[in-house]
Amino acid sequence: MKTKLIKATRMLSAFALLGAIIACGGDDDDSDESTTEAQGVAAAQPTAAGAAPGNLQLGQPPASLQVPIPPSMNFVVAENGEYQIDVTAGMGADPKLYVYQGETLVDQDDDGGDGLNARMIRFLEPGTYSVRVTDIRARPFTAQVAAQRLQALTPVGAITLGTPSVVTIPDFPIMERPRNDRDASRALTLNVAAAGQYTCTASADNNKDPKMALIQNGQLLEEDDDSGPGRNDASITRQLQPGTYVIRVWDWLHRGDHRITVNCRQG
């Protein structure tokens, strides 16, 4: 009698355990699969700026990601001239600026300003431009953007046709080397009395590599690096009308401690 009672108790326990398993909805493997399935926006959906990103599935075809235009500000240039654009940011940010006219990239800069700040100095013609700003590491930050027109460089001398003009570029301490062409340049005036073709060349000593620019009334007419007769000489040949022009010269790496000789002649 006692043995039959034990067997009956064991059978009742087994039925109770089976009922508990059925009530839980199946085995543990099925439960894990349903609760760990990825949820969220499909990877193929474009992500709007500021929205949570979608999921990228490893080993699957590429997913589309809509990348918006970076934050931008417009500015208007009313007359030819040399302009400076600055983008500054607080500690920890490393801004980069892009200047566009319409959808055409005019220029870009990363560390041309103080510290890690961006600065672009460039001759611009009249029109509407936009400054687009990003962080070099794609981080959020607050930027300060400024634009100004620069005064013309004060000439250090005047060119006489057929006579060499020597420009002295002082030595720059390595930590104070100019970061842009303007700050590394020296300017000379060129007076043209008669219309015609003129040729100007620039050569440097001390193993330097000169560049030369021809400017009139705030407009960059032409720029050259290595078209001259020497290994690194610069040369510009151009039809000129009577008037006053400016010749700028500098080393292409913004180095100092050298002299640049400029020769201009008709023909």
Image (spheres, grey):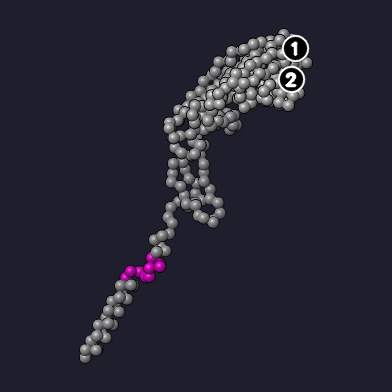
Give the residue drawn at x 70%, y 23%: 234
Give the residue drawn at x 30%, y 79%: 14
Instruction: Examine the structure image and report whether residue 26 is included in the region drawn in magenta.
Output: yes
Instruction: Examine the structure image and report whether residue 41 is included in the region drawn in magenta.
Output: no
Give the residue drawn at x 25%, y 82%: 9
Residue 257: x %, y % from top left: 62, 21
Q: Earlier in the sequence, mark 1 or mark 2?
A: 1
Residue 142: x %, y % from top left: 43, 32
Which mark is in front, 1 or 2? Answer: 1
Of the residues shown, which amino acid type is indicated by label 1? Answer: Gly
Callout 1: few (<14), some (14-19), or many (20+) C-alpha neighbours within 10 Å? few
Residue 79 position by quadrant = top right
What secondary structure is found at the residue carrying circle 2? strand
Residue beneath disc 2: 237
Of the residues shown, which amino acid type is indicated by label 2? Answer: Thr
In the shown orientation, is residue 62 left or right of residue 247? Answer: left
Residue at the far right in the pictured view: 267
Please, is residue 18 above or below residue 49 in the view? below
In the shown orientation, is residue 20 left or right of residue 67? Answer: left
Mark drawn on residue 184: none
Residue beneath disc 1: 162
Callout 2: few (<14), some (14-19), or many (20+) C-alpha neighbours within 10 Å? some
Residue 19 position by quadrant = bottom left
Give the residue drawn at x 73%, y 15%: 264
Name the image quarter holding the N terminus. Answer: bottom left
Which segment is the magenta one? Answer: 23-31
Please, is residue 23 above or below residue 235 in the view? below
In the shown orientation, is residue 227 left or right of residue 9? Answer: right
131 vs 102, nearest the viewer: 131
199 vs 249, nearest the viewer: 249
Q: Can residue 149 be seen in the rendering of this structure?
A: yes
What secondary structure is found at the residue carrying circle 1? loop
